[in-house]
Every structure is written in structure tokens, then in C-alpha cells.
């Protein structure tokens, strides 16, 4: 059974957190970093794959998501301190991180800034930091939100008032995943609507600005998983990450998009266990 609790931080903020619990079979603690937008609750396929492998899962809702306090002006780097606070609250010293989509940059932040706590990272369909070295938006089916975020939070807030979700961002395999193994993802995204748009807005602004750390600072082993057919985060982002992270491996999934790529989660957990379990 997953335990929920509010973790109070030194600055007075609260993070709503989750813990699947430890037992005699636990081999590894995994921090799950949720996508954008979600509630922060670990998804059923993640919990099932973890349980089968003796992995304890902890997670938390980023600021303004799922019952967590707002953190005005947050950058990606701020997730490192938040992760450590949650880990401390659950009595966890050393862990691995796995982040999907919007969770991926935040998973890297912990490894860059707290290498004493984060031993390895998996990113699934994760953005690269904004750069002018290549067309960062090229291949994104609907880049309007991130274009607005580049102009600042006010522009991103204004865009949220007129934004409409574009189903062409997903390929048929993505919709099949949402109807099948990853139906809990779609349900969680729907639940996240109750908490308003601020979490997603702040995520986008953070992604499109300086992250607050350099990729070269991530010394831990990193597994990058990318769908060749992803229309949300294009494959060039994975290539850029691979070229800048000192100890990275890339798994390209030739038939996958942004959601269907999540089917690799069990294999990615095995990869982590081989390195830090």
C-alpha cells in the first residue's frame, strides 16, 4: 500500500509525497519524477514493475501540483533540494531517479547537485536544456507553450488561457498505451486538472530558461530512453543530452512516441539494478 504524507520544508512550503514502503526484499529505492501535468502519485505500471524487482518507490508532487505548495520563480535545479527533503522524510539515504517527460530534467537535477544522494538516473522522453546550438523546437508538433515560456511567465500564463490540447502530438502507439498499460497515466493527468495550471506553467518556464546546473555536472550513470517518433520531445533532444552528459547511454525506441516509450520502464529498472542495486 502506498503511503501519502505532506513533507514540510524549512521555507514553510509543503510537498505532497508518496512511498510504496520497504520490506526484506528491497534492493533499491527509486525516486519517480512525474510528467507535466500529473499529480505526483506513482503510476500503477511503475509500482507493479518495481514491486516485482524489490524496488521501493518514492515520489512527490512538484510545486503547485497535486497538493504541493507553490514555489514562485523555481528553476529545474530546485528539484534537487526538494528530492532530498522527501528522501529524508522517508528515511532514505541513497537512491536512483527515474523521470518521464517533464520529470526527466528534474531527475537529472538531483544527480547534478546531490551526487551524494542520487546514484543513477533514467530519463524517458526528456527535454534537453534550451540551447541555440540547434533548433530546440524543431519536430515538436505543438511548441506554442514553450515558445511562450521563453518570453517569461506572464506570456506563458496568457498562452494557458487560449491553449488547446492537440491530439496530433501522439502517434497511434501512444493512444494504444493510454488505452492499455498506461491508462493510469491518462487518469492521473485528468485528476491533476483540479489543482490548476500553475504547476505546468512553472515547469515550462523552468524548462525554457537556465536549468541552474550544467549537464557536465551529472557524473552518475544516466540511461536516456527516447522514442524515434515522439512528436512532443523530438529525438534531437536525446542526442544533445547524450553528447553532453559524461556517463550516458541512449536507448532509441524506433516505433515509439511520447507515451508508448514508457513500456521500457521494467527494462530500465533492470538497468538500474545492474548498476546500483
Image (spheres, rainbow, N blue to C red):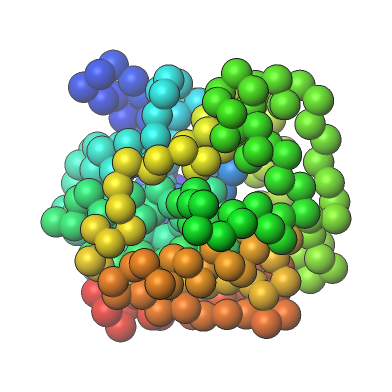
Toward the front, the furthest residue is 133
At which x and y percent is residue 63?
45, 29
- Count of picture labels: 0
Residue 44 lies in quadrant: bottom right
Q: In the shown orientation, is residue 80 left or right of residue 177?
A: left
Quick check: can you spot residue 159? yes
Answer above or below: position of 118 versus 7: below
Residue at the spot x=81%, y=25% of the render? 162
Out of 204 and 25, give the one closest to the viewer: 204
Q: Hey, which quadrant is residue 121 in on the image?
A: bottom left
Determine if residue 262 is in view.
no
Dividing the picture into quadrants, the one containing residue 245 is bottom left
Instruction: Please provide percent x and percent y for residue 120.
Output: 29, 67
193 lies left or right of 120: right
The image shows residue 196, relative to residue 84, as above or below, that is above
Q: Residue at x 47, y 78 (%)?
A: 250
> Residue at coordinates 33% horizontally, 50% vertically from top-left?
109
Q: Quadrant of the C terminus?
A: bottom left
Q: Residue at x 58, y 67 (%)?
A: 236
Task: Point out residue 191 in the picture as x, y percentages from the top left corner.
Answer: 67, 35
In the displayed structure, 15 sits above or below 264; it is: above
From the viewer's side, name the closer residue of 250 and 177.
250
Q: Position of residue 160 (x, y in %)?
A: 72, 26
Amino acid at each position: 500500500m502506498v503511503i501519502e504524507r505532506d513533507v514540510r520544508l524549512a521555507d514553510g512550503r509543503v510537498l505532497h509525497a508518496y512511498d510504496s514502503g520497504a520490506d526484506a526484499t528491497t534492493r533499491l529505492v527509486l525516486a519517480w519524477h512525474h510528467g507535466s501535468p500529473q499529480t505526483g502519485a506513482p503510476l500503477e505500471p511503475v509500482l507493479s514493475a518495481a514491486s516485482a524487482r524489490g524496488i521501493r518507490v518514492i515520489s512527490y508532487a512538484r510545486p503547485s501540483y497535486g497538493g504541493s505548495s507553490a514555489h514562485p520563480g523555481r528553476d529545474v535545479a530546485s528539484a534537487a533540494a526538494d528530492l532530498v527533503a522527501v528522501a529524508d522524510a522517508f528515511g532514505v539515504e541513497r537512491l536512483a531517479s527515474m523521470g518521464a517527460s517533464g520529470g526527466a530534467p528534474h531527475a537529472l537535477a538531483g544527480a547534478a547537485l546531490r551526487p551524494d544522494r542520487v546514484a543513477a538516473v533514467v530519463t524517458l522522453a526528456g527535454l534537453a536544456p534550451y540551447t541555440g546550438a540547434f533548433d530546440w523546437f524543431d519536430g515538436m508538433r505543438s511548441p506554442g507553450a514553450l515558445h511562450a515560456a521563453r518570453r517569461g511567465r506572464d506570456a506563458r500564463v496568457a498562452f494557458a488561457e487560449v491553449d488547446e490540447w492537440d491530439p496530433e502530438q501522439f502517434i497511434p502507439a501512444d493512444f494504444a498505451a493510454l488505452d492499455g498499460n498506461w491508462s493510469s497515466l491518462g487518469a492521473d493527468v485528468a485528476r491533476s486538472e483540479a489543482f490548476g495550471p500553475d504547476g505546468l506553467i512553472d515547469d515550462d518556464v523552468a524548462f525554457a530558461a537556465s536549468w541552474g546546473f550544467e549537464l557536465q555536472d551529472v557524473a552518475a550513470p544516466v540511461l536516456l530512453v527516447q522514442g524515434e517518433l515522439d512528436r512532443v520531445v523530438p529525438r534531437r533532444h536525446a542526442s544533445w543530452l547524450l553528447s553532453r552528459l559524461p556517463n550516458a547511454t541512449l536507448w532509441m525506441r524506433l516505433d515509439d512516441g511520447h507515451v508508448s516509450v514508457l513500456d521500457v520502464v521494467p527494462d530500465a529498472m533492470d538497468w538500474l539494478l545492474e548498476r546500483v542495486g
